[in-house]
Amino acid sequence: MTSQNPIAPAASESRRTVTAAVVQAAAPLFDTRAALDRAGELIREAVSGRGAEVVVLPEAFLGGYPKGLDFGITVGSRTPAGRELFRRYHAAAIDVPGPEVHELAALTRELGCHAVVGAVERQRGTLYCVALFFGPDGYLGLHRKLMPTAAERYLWGQGDGSTLPVVDTGAARIGAGICWENYMPLFRTAMYAKGVDLWCAPSVDDRDAWQATMRHIALEGRCFVLGANQYLRRDALPADLHPVQGDDPGTVLIGGGSVIVSPLGEVLAGPLRDGEGILTAELDLDDLTRARFDFDPAGHYSRPDVFTLHVDESARATVRTV
């Protein structure tokens, strides 16, 4: 007599899955049109060629990440050459909304997919590092990086609490933490409380230690982590620039490390090294509930009688007209 497994799924149950892709690539610096074309090609390849329903591109893919450039800054002084370099960087950033956003929105409407795209947003004289959200309905919103890291602070302004979206796709809830925001425990707690299921991590951190961070967030948040990192070589920068890493065209400035992690910290794809590429994984969304059975950081494991977090999601404008 054959015994039945008492916890086997019923025959009528079907798996709830989402195919996710993380893109590891970079675009030529200061060439917005080329970056936009490259983003479109990569999203189309991930969806049409790999079956992805959610695609994540790295930090500052549109607008560029100027790794190794100092913009002529030392403490207490700036140079004319550095100001001109910033002018070029500012010119390569994008307006939100703007033509680049409209073009990507048309693409995700055509493909019927969701995408999270790292970009540099231009708002008058200030630049912001952002994650742009797109879906089958087009442009859905953005998240501005709350705290630029180290020398990024002389390039990018700080975001505020008004751009902390979690997008409900109907199948899963998507949010984003950009690069070292992933180290901010209170930011993570706020995002966990919003019920994020797919934690998108556009980044340029290529260190081996970053892999521990991606796995930790998956375990702590009991969410899937989609880590998309740049792979950038010296030959993607204009010839007149001189990064501190050297001028050999093949010098690797950002070495990748894109990865997809399960809600129990298991690596499902990657980390990808030594070149550009696209990683994909089929995500079993029921793994979210299975993982939260014994740990839910903003739910049954949160102890609100002891710990509370106040989050101010109001916009912080310098000038308010009433």
Image (cartoon, rainbow, N blue to C red):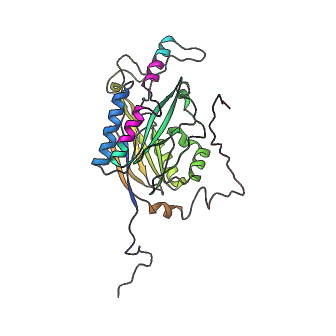
**Is residue 128 positioned above or below 208 on the image?**
above
Range of magenta residues: 85-106
At which x and y percent is residue 35? 36, 31
Say whether residue 274 is left or right of residue 117: left
Name the quadrant containing residue 311. top right
Say whether residue 175 is left or right of residue 39: right
Task: Please report the residue visible at 45 percent of the width from the left and 18 percent of the height from the top.
Answer: 85
At which x and y percent is residue 153? 56, 27
Task: Please report the residue visible at 33 percent of the width from the left and 34 percent of the height from the top.
Answer: 38
Q: Nearer the viewer, residue 242 or 165?
A: 165
**Is residue 311 positioned above or below 82 on the image?**
below
Say whether residue 252 is left or right of residue 93: left
At which x and y percent is residue 273? 36, 40
**Is residue 281 positioned above or below 290 on the image?**
above
Confirm whether residue 272 shows in the render: no
Q: Nearer the viewer, residue 206 or 156?
A: 156
Confirm whether residue 31 shows in the render: yes
Extreme-left residue of the structure: 49
Residue 86 covered by magenta stretch? yes
Extreme-bottom residue of the structure: 1
Q: Nearer the viewer, residue 148 or 119?
A: 119
Residue 293 covered by magenta stretch? no
Q: Which image quarter is the N terminus in? A: bottom left
Task: Please report the residue visible at 68 percent of the width from the left and 47 percent of the height from the top.
Answer: 310
